[in-house]
């Protein structure tokens, strides 16, 4: 009885700690949403005012009219979905090759690929820019999307570790039945790795959607700008429209939130698998 009471107390303490941590993590999000509905005076008030006296919904209209918001939003959609599709095509194929197909130098190339993860971006930035410039890709979406079709080392490593857990006997049975490597990959490996693929898709989606630096380097035409380059426009030389900026940021968060809610079931399963591999 005493042991049960002790266990119940421990669980309650863990719940309280979890709730407190969740609140701490949610505070910036709550602040962003409430700030988007405040007046300038309420934003600058001291002590800080958490909730607006009267929500100013017009801030969202002003935010979307301040610059070509929906055009930039559409540009972000194009870049982000291009990168997600690229990662979902390239990473599983490369990982399958590294994990289940025997070819000369496989391990050498795998460790070379892992070594590229250690390189700081500033080391590769100038050579990459020169290559894309020679190809005539500057001021297009190609430098932002095409690299995703060549694979991302972290995603390839994650998938390779998962593929290695699939019994070779299963693949050998399929080969004996006459299945090609591509058929095995498409009909056996991809369905089994669905939770990991959703996890990769989310990470790629968030990374591409919020990517500010790469579009800043490769895009000069404002008509091609993604939303990440549009949000800083609220910060002027003499004044900053914080409420409009927070309203635009809140809208920009919606696609990520929708993606998470749709894929929530698979994402949690993928995180569990990733945790077990760790």
Image: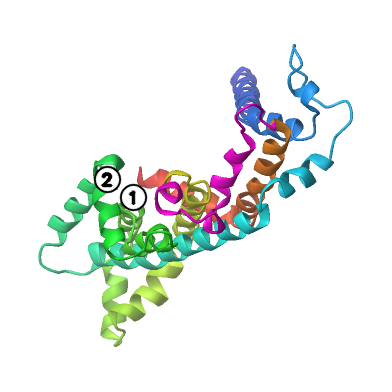
What residue is drawn where x is 26% and y is 62%? 134
Which of the 4 image quarters holds residue 110? bottom left
Looking at the rendered image, the disc whose residue lies closer to the viewer, 1 or 2, is 2
Disc 1 to disc 2: CB gap under 8 Å: yes
Of mark 1 and mark 2, the one earlier in the sequence is 2
- Residue at 54% from the left image edge and 49% from the top image edge: 268
Which residue is label 1 attached to? Answer: 154
- In magenta, the rendered stretch is 214-241
Q: Is residue 164 visible in the rendered structure shown here?
A: no
Q: Residue 114, percent across and down?
A: 23, 49
Quadrant of the snapshot with the C terminus = top left
Indicate yes or no whether the magenta region holds residue 224.
yes
Residue 160 percent coordinates (x, y): 30, 57
| Extreme residue toward the top, this view | 47
Q: Taking 102 as reference, is 121 left or right?
A: right
- Element type at marker 2? loop
Q: Give the percent coordinates (x, y) of residue 155.
A: 36, 54
Give the CA distance from mark 1 to mark 2: 8 Å
Vertical arrangement, residue 17 with respect to residue 251, above or below? above
Q: Which residue is painted at 59% across and 46% down in the image?
A: 230
Residue named by callout 2 = 117
Query: As displayed, is residue 126 above or below residue 243?
Result: below
């Amino acid at each position: 009885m005493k042991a049960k009471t002790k266990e119940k107390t421990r669980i309650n303490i863990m719940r309280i700690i979890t709730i407190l941590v969740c609140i701490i993590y949610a505070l910036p999000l709550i602040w962003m949403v409430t700030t988007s509905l405040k007046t300038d005076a309420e934003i600058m008030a001291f002590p800080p005012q958490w909730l607006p006296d009267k929500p100013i919904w017009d801030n969202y209209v002003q935010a979307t009219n301040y610059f070509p918001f929906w055009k930039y939003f559409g540009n972000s959609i194009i870049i982000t979905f291009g990168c997600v599709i690229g990662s979902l095509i390239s990473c599983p194929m490369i990982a399958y090759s590294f994990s289940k197909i025997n070819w000369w130098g496989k391990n050498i190339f795998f460790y070379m690929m892992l070594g590229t993860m250690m390189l700081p971006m500033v080391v590769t930035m100038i050579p990459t820019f020169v290559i894309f410039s020679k190809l005539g890709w500057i001021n297009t979406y190609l430098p932002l999307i095409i690299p995703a079709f060549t694979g991302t080392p972290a995603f390839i490593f994650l998938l390779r570790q998962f593929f290695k857990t699939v019994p070779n006997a299963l693949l050998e049975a399929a080969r004996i039945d006459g299945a090609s490597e591509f058929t095995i990959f498409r009909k056996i490996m991809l369905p089994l790795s669905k939770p990991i693929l959703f996890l990769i898709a989310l990470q790629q989606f968030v990374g591409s959607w919020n990517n500010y630096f790469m579009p800043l380097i490769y895009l000069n035409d404002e008509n091609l700008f993604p939303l990440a380059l549009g949000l800083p426009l609220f910060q002027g030389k003499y004044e900053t429209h914080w409420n409009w900026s927070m309203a635009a940021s809140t809208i920009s968060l919606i696609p990520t939130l929708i993606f998470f809610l749709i894929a929530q079931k698979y994402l949690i399963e993928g995180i569990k698998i990733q945790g077990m591999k760790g």
